[in-house]
Amino acid sequence: MVERAPDPGTGETMNASCIFCRIAAGEIPSPRVYEDEHLFVIRDINPAAPVHLLVIPREHVESVGALEERHAELAGRLLLAVRRVAEQEGIAGSGFRMVANTGREGGQTVPHLHLHVLGGRQLTGHGTA
Ligand code: AMP
Ligand code: ZN
């Protein structure tokens, strides 16, 4: 994997072969449901529910399993973004699910941290199915 040098200002690294880093950089177009300087939210390309969003930090953090103390504020911002887009999409009242697949047995397929937000139908079980 090709890793770019950390940005001297933010310390962020971008992984040039990572699809979510490429979307973050605008190399792959993907309409934003919400974005700010820390994170962005897109619609899942293969939705498992009428509303299926991905809340993605701009920084390339591999998974929940790779979060460090320095990510404490970012982790909070990701959660608050979930609440914000759930309201925006009209599923805050009816209810929704937030999922963070983590690692191989967690079923993570894109190794860049993301929170799935699913809603708009009755969900069962515990996953994105
Ligand atoms: P996970 O399996 O938890 O790693 O989730 C990765 C998710 O990213 C899957 O639900 C994919 O459908 C979704 N995905 C992959 N590529 C894209 C893309 N280019 N745009 C939007 N969603 C994507
Ligand atoms: Zn990445």
Image: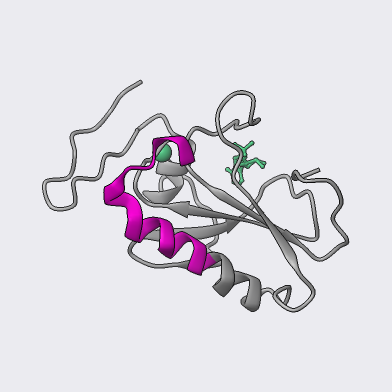
Asked if residue 97 is among those painted magenta in the image, a careful observer would answer no
Residue 115: horizontal and vertical position, in percent?
57, 51
Q: Which residue lies furthest to the left in this view?
A: 8
Rendered image quadrant of residue 11: top left
Q: In this view, does 37 lie above or below 88?
A: above
Q: Quadrant of the N terminus?
A: top left
Residue at 59%, 45% in the rendered image: 100
Q: Is residue 105 above or below residue 57?
A: above
Residue 39: horizontal and vertical position, in percent?
41, 59
Q: Can residue 1 be seen in this view?
A: yes
Residue at 40%, 42% in the rendered image: 21
Rendered image quadrant of residue 95: bottom right
Q: In this view, does 97 lie above or below 88?
A: above
Foreground residue among 61 and 8: 61
Q: Is residue 75 left or right of residue 94?
A: left
Q: Which residue lies furthest to the front in this view?
A: 69
* Chain part drawn in magenta: 63-81
Foreground residue among 50 and 32: 50
Q: In this view, does 70 lie to the left or right of 44?
A: left
Residue 33: horizontal and vertical position, in percent?
56, 67
Residue at 34%, 55% in the rendered image: 72
Foreground residue among 108 and 124: 124
Which secondary structure is most common in the magenta stretch?
helix
Q: Can residue 63 be seen in this view?
A: no
Residue at 51%, 63% in the rendered image: 79
